[in-house]
Image (cartoon, rainbow, N blue to C red):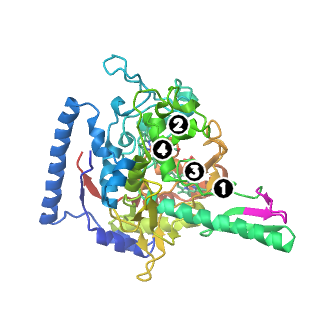
Amino acid sequence: MRKRTLLLASVAAAGAALADGAWSPRAAMRDLAIPDEAVLLEQLEEAIELRRREEFDRFLDARDPGELIEHATLTEVDFRHRTLGVDTLFVVGDELFGLLVRPENGWGGGGTDRAAVDYAPALNRVHRGAAGGPDAFGCFSCHSKGGPDGAGMQTQNAFLAGDGERLGSADQRNPPHLLGLGPIAVLAREMTAELQAHAAAAVEEARTSGRSVRRDLSAKGVLFGAITAAPDGTIDHSGIDGVDRDLVVRPFGWKGHQATLIGMIEESLHIHQGMLSMRIQQEVRDGVLDGAPYGRGERWFDLDGDGVTLEIDHGMLATMEGYLVQLEVPVMRAPRSPDLLDLFAAGRNHFAAVGCAACHVPTLEIQSARYEVRPVADLPPFVIDVAADGEVPKVEPKYASPKTPYLVHLFSDLKRHDMGDELASPAPQGDIPPRMFLTRPLWGLAETAPYMHDGRAPTVHDAIARHGGDAAAARDAYLALDERGRAALRVFLTSLSREPKLFIP
Ligand code: HEC
Ligand code: HEC
C-alpha cells in the first residue's frame, strides 16, 4: 500500500515561511490552495494507477497468500546484487510500513501447519511483558491519525509490559506521529557526541592536573547536569540530569528509551507484530540476549517457532529506516483571520513567558544533514540528506549560505524530566524511573490528539493541565493567565501542524 497524497499548498512557500525561525509570523501568510491543473492531473493519474495496482495485488494475495511481502522486502542479498538508490529505500520502506503482515510472513509465533484451523496465533492487545503482543498487523494500523505516518487515537494505544490479560496491568502508550524523525536522529547523534566530548575532556583534565574536575554537561544549549572526574579516571555520575550514564541521548519513545531508529523499528516489529530480526536471533544464539521474550523455538533462526526462518534481516530494517528518515517534517501554519492571528502572536510570547520553552525548546540546530543507512555491514552505506531527500517539506538551512546549520523546530530539548506522580508509569522502564519522561516534541501537535503518553488528555488545555513535577510551575503559570491569555497559548499550539495534503485512502 503506497500512500497517495495530493499536496495542497506550494511547498516552496512553506519553506520560506519557516526559514527565519519557528517564530516567524510570515507563516501566517500561507493558505490552502488547489494546485494548478497539470499538477493535479498528474497526481490524480498517479493515485489511480496506485489504486489499480493495489486492487491487482489483493487478487494476487488471495491466490498466493503471503506473496505480497515480496514487494515490501529488500534483503541483504538484494542490496549485494543490485544497485539501488535512496528513493528505492523510500518506496519499498513505504510498502513495508503499509503492509498487513500475515502469519505466512512470520507474523506472531504460531504453528507451522498452514492447513490447521488454529494455525494463526491470536492477537493479544495486552502485551505479555517484554514478549509483546502481537497487537497489530501493520505499522500503519497505529500510525495513521492526521495523515500517513501519523499518530494514533485512544483506541490504537499499545498496552506495553502487561500480564497478557488485564488492561490495568499494562503501561499504556499512545502512538506518536513519525514525521521529522531523520532530523531528530541527527540531533540526538550530535548531542551525544557533545556530551561525551565533555566527559572525555573532564577525564583528561583530571588526569593531567591530578585533581578532581567538575564539568557542566551541555549540548546545543541544553544542560544535562554535570559530572565530576577523578584523577584516577573514575567518574561521579550523580550530578547527571535527564540522560543516561553513558551520555547517549535517546530521542525515541515517550520515556526516551531508544537511541536509534533501527532499535525502535526492530522493537516495534517484535512487540507489535511478532516479527524477529536476524540480529536478535543471532544474539540469543550467542548468549548475548536473554531469549525468553522471543519464543521457545528449537532452532536459533526460528526462535518463535512459526516455521518462517527469515522474518526480518538487516536489509529490511535498513529499508524501513531509510523510509522513516526521508519523511516530511511538520510545519507551523498560523491562522489567517486577523483576530486569531493576534492571539497566535500573543500565544507565541506566552509560550516562552510561562516557561513552556524551557523544556519544549522551539528550535535546535543540526550541523550536518548526513544520515547513513547501512543495510550490509561490509558495503558502503546509503547517504541520505535529511534536508533534501524524500518527502517535502524538509528542515531549512539557517542562512542562505553557508548551508549549515539547519533549523529543527521540534519544540523539545530531548531530555527527560520528572513529570510528577499523576503521570508516572506503573513501573520503571529499564533504568528510567516511573516519573521521568522525554520532553515530547510538539511539532505536528494539531493533528495528534489525544495527548500525553497514554492519550489521557483530549485537548491541548487538558494536556497542559496534566503537567506536574518539574513542569508544575509552567502549568500553574498557564492556568493563572486570563482566559484570553490561555486561548492565545492554545491557538499558538494549534499552529504546530503538518503540511496540508489530501490523503486518498
Ligand atoms: C499497536 C500500535 C503500534 C503499532 C502497530 C506500531 N507502533 Fe510505533 N509506536 C506505538 C507507540 C505506542 C509508540 C510509543 C512507544 C513508547 O513510548 O515506547 C510508538 C513509537 C514509535 C516510534 C518512535 C517515535 C517517537 O517519536 O518516539 C517509531 C519510530 C515507531 N513507533 C515505528 C513503528 C514501526 C516502524 C512500526 C511497524 C513495524 C510500528 N511503529 C508499529 C504504537 C505502535
Ligand atoms: C519540565 C519540562 C516541561 C515543561 C516546563 C512543559 N512541558 Fe509539556 N511536556 C513535557 C513532557 C515530558 C511531556 C510528555 C509527558 C507525558 O506524556 O506523560 C509533555 C507533553 C506536552 C504536551 C502533549 C504532547 C503530545 O503529543 O501529547 C503538550 C501539548 C505540552 N507538553 C505543552 C506544554 C505547554 C503549553 C507548556 C507550558 C505551559 C509545557 N508543555 C511545559 C515536558 C514539559
Q: Specify the label residue 266 is tagged with.
A: 4
Q: How many marks?
A: 4
**Whole-number angstrom distance, CA of label 1 to CA of label 2:** 22 Å
Magenta-drawn stretch contains 233: yes
Q: In the picture, residue 402 is in which quadrant?
A: bottom left
- Residue at the limit of the structure toward the right, as seen here: 210
Where does the N terminus fall, quadrant-wise?
Answer: top left
Give the residue number, with chain letter if any, for mark 1: 242
Find numbered disc 2 in the image and state the secondary structure of the residue it sits on: strand
Q: Position of residue 380 (x, y in %)?
A: 43, 62
- Inter-mark Cα distance, 3 to 1: 10 Å
For marks 2 and 4, the one nearer the N-term is: 2
Element class at badge 3: loop
* 24 shown above or below 445: below
The magenta segment:
226-237
Ligand 1 within 8 Å, label 4 CB: no
Q: Is 292 or 325 nearer to us in this picture?
A: 292
**Residue 410 as seen in the image, left or right of residue 39:** right
Residue 174 covered by magenta stretch: no
- Residue 266, position as x, y percentages in the image: 48, 44
Asked whether residue 322 appears in the rendered view, the answer is: yes
Looking at the image, which is closer to me, 365 or 36?
365
Residue at the far bottom: name it.
401
Callout 1 amino acid: Gly
The residue identified by callout 3 is 256
- Residue 356 vs 117, above or below: the answer is below
